[in-house]
Amino acid sequence: MVGVTEPVQEYERDETSGWTGSATQLPGYPVPKFGAAMSSEIYSGAIDWDKVYRAFHHPSRIAECILAELNGGADSVVFSGFAETASFLADKLPVTFVDYSPSVTARARERYPKLGEVLTGDVTQLLALLPATSVAIACRISAYWNSTEQFRRLANSVLAFTRERILIDFFDRDLVESGHSIAFNSVDGTGKWRFRDFKESVGVTPPFSTATLTVSYSLSDLNVGYEDHRSFFRRGVLQQWGRSMFPEYDVEIGESLLDSDPSFLLKLVRKRAGSQPHAADGTPGTPDG
């Protein structure tokens, strides 16, 4: 519950797997525990996250934004994010939905039969096996990424097949400061995020910041509250990383896929023959020679 001070447990970062440790319990809410790669307990099936996302984050609008970014050039897409968003995408093109949580994927199979394929696992690994022409990793799945190895694995998996467009959204470090709060209000209920204790990464490429995120949602039949760490990135840093890892792609920064959200979109678009290289500021440059 917001306004009640709770002791914060210590976390350690495993270089390959993610944050380890247990989350701080918020009074009046279930006790979530967090596994190495994702917040496993709160995604174990006890909480119907589709209700939360539908109340506050508008899955259908996210799908519309993704389709606009794909610009009609996709014949298939690997998607990781809200399952209901994947279902809306599946109205327009074949979708392979990937999520780390077995309960999320089981519920997606049950609720969204339009999804062509539903896979359980780490999208940065499974991409290496999926030849879709487009990739959309949305809804800030990247907030769980916190190691050089994860980004290296992502790049290798993206490049395993010829892709036309890759979309990945990230929490924006420049839009959030310690103590910042975001309130959510809808006809279905209220929610609140609070950010604190930002820390900078050391020896990780690309560099990022971590913050403690306190989350609470209250709906008529559902209350959720927990604390965990999330990763935040800077636009320029991610654009430079993208250009170094994906030289065959134009790397652009776009606005958030979610309404009023402190995030940005990293867009990779395969270069066409004769396209101009881009300078560090993103403007067209002069071809070599």
Image (cartoon, grey):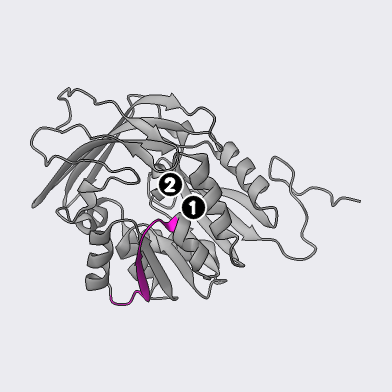
Q: Is residue 179 above or below residue 145?
A: above
Q: Residue furthest right?
A: 289
Question: Mark 2 = which residue?
Answer: 142
Residue at coordinates 53% horizontally, 34% vertically from top-left? 204
Instruction: Tell which circle, 1 or 2, labels the residue nearer the N-terminal end.
Output: 2
Instruction: Determine the secondary structure under disc 2.
Output: helix
Instruction: Name the one closer to the observer, 56 or 206.
Output: 206
Residue at coordinates 52% horizontally, 76% vertically from top-left? 75
Circle 1 packing at 10 Å, graded few (<14), some (14-19), many (20+), is many
Percent x, y of residue 12:
35, 30
Residue type highlighted by circle 1: Ile
Q: Quadrant of the N terminus?
A: top left
Residue at coordinates 60% horizontally, 60% vertically from top-left? 159
Magenta-highlighted residues: 113-123
Q: CA distance from mark 1 to mark 2?
A: 8 Å
Residue 115 is covered by the magenta coloring: yes
- In this rendering, the count of numbered labels is 2
Instruction: Determine the secondary structure under disc 1.
Output: strand
Circle 2 packing at 10 Å, graded few (<14), some (14-19), many (20+), is many
Instruction: Name the one closer to the observer, 57 or 165.
Output: 165
Percent x, y of residue 184:
25, 43
Residue 98 is covered by the magenta coloring: no
Instruction: Name the one closer to the observer, 23 or 263.
Output: 23
Percent x, y of residue 202:
51, 27
Question: Mark 1 = which residue?
Answer: 168
Q: Is residue 175 above or below residue 189?
A: above
The nearer-to-camera label among 1 and 2 is 2
Q: Is residue 28 above or below residue 270?
A: above
Percent x, y of residue 8:
23, 25
Q: Are marks 1 and 2 in contact (CB under 8 Å)?
A: yes
